[in-house]
Image: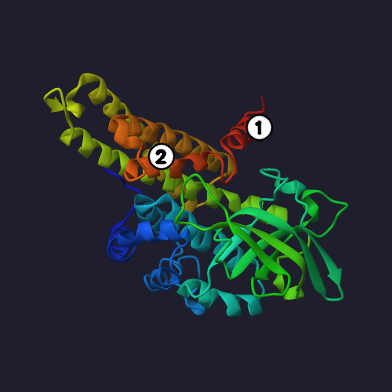
């Protein structure tokens, strides 16, 4: 089915991103996986391509697309190469940057946004805590006033880009008497005294992206480091979660679609009992089902992207997109592994790595169970 969500301008941007990734990134993915880190020079080159500044106003050196569909294009092309790449880059340009553009002081915008757009600064966001998981309102990291400054103490875990980030948005409790209304957000420079990184976490999949624990031992922050007003952090996170979730959904389907395309090629070429394995009725019917699932899911995700680019996607519709795309992605990739047979279980085959990379999508950005809870509440049942 012909997609109608994008214009010729989006198509031109897609080609430029695709050419960049094919030339500079794809040949080096194995090296990034081995090092569990994306080379900093790649970040700078992505900045030159305009990928990292899509949400940054041109007055701060960004490309200021003012159209979420450009974000979606970049996300799709990154996901087709690697889920780890899209998770690292999208955290930076699609999730962290809007917080700074919308909520930071002018001083902080001038200090950080040009470097974010250029790739000279890598960003991360610290929400999840060792004891908190999806319960963001129950976080323990705290920030207390000391004159005009704030003193930040606590820890975060499972932080994408955590090992390499120069700047981290950190959610902390500033009012212990309140639950969600006691949470504030801070911009934390990783060079500050008391900021410490844990080890690179050894994940089942996505080794290319560095993921780490972060520790804050009485980190002194100026008043200008706060994003927005005290006590508004939880509301700010809830407001921006739909963009994180639709971005995740875009990546999920693009990733599964690419691996399915490669699997269909494999099914044409692989011979068994004197014929291609794709010609067996069971496999042919299975591939028909998988292609249909991807295209139906793609239609919903495209509609969600268009809506988000216009009036903005609701939290409920974003939850639908996130959980369903993760479900479809994992279902499709599991079948792709099966079609490869024993080779599908070998790490040297891309399908095996993709299968491992995809499993976390049912957990991050809000687990699929939490997504269903959000949808169910809206049904008033």
Q: How is the image coloured?
A: rainbow
Local secondary structure at mark 1: helix
- Residue identifier under label 1: 377
Quadrant position of residue 289: top left
- Image quadrant containing the N terminus: top left
| Residue 144 shows up from this direction | yes
Local secondary structure at mark 2: helix
Label 2, label 1: how far apart the Cα atoms are? 31 Å
Q: Of callouts 2 and 1, which one flags the residue occurring earlier in the amino acid sequence?
A: 2
Q: Is residue 316 above or below residue 52?
A: above
- Residue identifier under label 2: 355
Q: Position of residue 353 (x, y in %)?
A: 39, 44
84 or 95: nearer the eye? 84
Please name the residue shown 42% across and 73% down the image: 44
Q: Position of residue 119 (x, y in %)?
A: 47, 72
- Image quadrant containing the C terminus: top right
């Amino acid at each position: 089915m012909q997609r109608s969500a994008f214009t010729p301008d989006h198509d031109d941007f897609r080609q430029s991103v695709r050419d960049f990734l094919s030339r500079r990134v794809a040949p080096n993915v194995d090296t990034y996986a081995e090092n569990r880190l994306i080379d900093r020079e790649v970040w700078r080159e992505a900045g030159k391509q305009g990928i990292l500044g899509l949400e940054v106003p041109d007055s701060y050196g960004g490309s200021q697309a003012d159209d979420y569909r450009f974000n979606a294009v970049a996300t799709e092309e990154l996901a087709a190469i690697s889920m780890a790449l899209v998770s690292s880059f999208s955290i930076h340009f699609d999730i962290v940057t809007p917080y700074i553009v919308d909520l930071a002081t002018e001083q902080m915008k001038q200090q950080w946004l040009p470097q974010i757009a250029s790739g000279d600064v890598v960003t991360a966001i610290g929400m999840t805590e060792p004891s908190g998981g999806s319960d963001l309102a129950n976080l323990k990291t705290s920030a207390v006033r000391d004159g005009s400054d704030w003193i930040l103490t606590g820890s975060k875990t499972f932080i994408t880009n955590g090992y390499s980030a120069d700047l981290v948005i950190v959610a902390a409790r500033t009012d212990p008497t309140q639950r969600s209304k006691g949470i504030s957000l801070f911009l934390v420079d990783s060079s500050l005294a008391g900021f410490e990184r844990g080890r690179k976490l050894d994940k089942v999949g996505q080794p290319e992206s560095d993921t780490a624990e972060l520790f804050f031992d009485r980190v002194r922050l100026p008043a200008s480091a706060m994003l927005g007003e005290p006590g508004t952090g939880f509301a700010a996170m809830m407001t921006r979660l739909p963009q994180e979730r639709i971005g995740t959904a875009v990546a999920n389907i693009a990733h599964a679609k690419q691996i399915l395309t490669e699997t269909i090629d494999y099914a044409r070429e692989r011979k068994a009992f004197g014929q291609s394995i794709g010609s067996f009725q069971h496999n042919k019917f299975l591939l028909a089902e998988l292609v249909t699932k991807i295209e139906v899911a793609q239609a919903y995700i495209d509609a969600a992207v268009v809506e988000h680019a216009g009036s903005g996607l609701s939290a409920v519709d974003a939850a639908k997109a996130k959980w369903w795309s993760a479900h479809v992605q994992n279902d499709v990739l599991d079948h792709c592994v099966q079609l490869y047979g024993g080779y599908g279980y070998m790490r040297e085959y891309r399908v095996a790595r993709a299968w491992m990379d995809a499993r976390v999508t049912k957990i991050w950005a809000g687990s699929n169970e939490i997504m269903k809870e959000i949808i169910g509440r809206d049904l008033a049942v």
